[in-house]
Image (cartoon, rainbow, N blue to C red):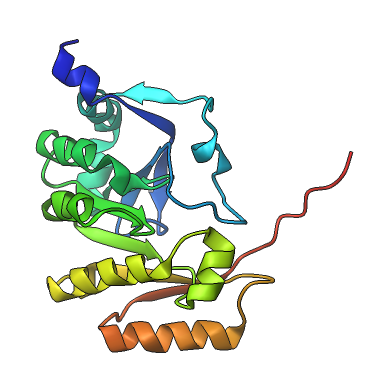
Amino acid sequence: MNSAECIMEVPIIGISRHRLGVDGKGITSLVAFHGCTLHCRYCLNPQCLVPDSMCLMMTPDELCDELMIDDLYFQATGGGVCFGGGEPLLRSDFIREFRSLAPMAWHITVETSLQVTQKQLEEVFPCIDHYIVDIKDTSPDIYRRYTGGQVERALGHLQWLVNEGVAHRIVVRLPHIPDFNSDDDVKRSRRLLENMGITHFDEFNYIKNIKLSD
């Protein structure tokens, strides 16, 4: 392995194959990166924030070779690869290199909170076919209490994507979050996002995980 490949090696917490109807069109494989900019209270993948979490260290070439086993499924169904995490756009250089190696028929989707820099968003923009944007809630207070972050940054990046003409390729997730937002909060968020130009939404209910004592 040369030095360039070493630089591009990143930690991946898991690869889930043969997914249908959850990551966009067709059959997809979900690639979950380690690392995130948020600390969501009901995080589904808390291992992405654990420093010593067990990860696969892979280069773009190695990942492409790993996923090539499903090339027939991807091309026959219009599917491809969904990058999640964690926050996949923290690995924008990796995704850009992967896109240059993978068959162009593979659709590339990202599941993102958009809590990254403008540079990272712009770097990966030419490589992405679909965006699944996890906004949580547009209220700055609710968002801060639930994620520890600032929603204004995510909304600014979302508006940039809309201005670039890709609103039709964006699905915004608006969860109903126990103890954090109400049905009215979700409706308010949806109205604000519709006014921004978003037309596709995924509303669903979070199920609160209760940790039982020993």
Q: How many marks?
A: 0
Which quadrant holds the N terminus?
top left
Which of the two residues, 204 or 120, is positioned nearer the viewer here? 120
The quadrant in which residue 96 appears is top left
In percent of the image, x 62 and y 56: which residue is there?
42
At which x and y percent is residue 150?
43, 65
Residue 179 shows up from this direction: yes
In percent of the image, x 31 and y 24: which residue is there?
58
Q: Is residue 11 above or below residue 163?
A: above
At which x and y percent is residue 197?
25, 83
Q: Residue furthest right?
A: 214
Residue 128 shows up from this direction: no
Q: Is residue 202 above or below residue 107?
A: below
Q: Residue furthest top?
A: 1
Q: Is residue 58 above or below residue 13?
A: above
Q: Is 63 left, or right, of 49 in this rendering?
A: left
At which x and y percent is residue 95?
22, 41
Which of the two residues, 204 or 45, is positioned nearer the viewer here? 45
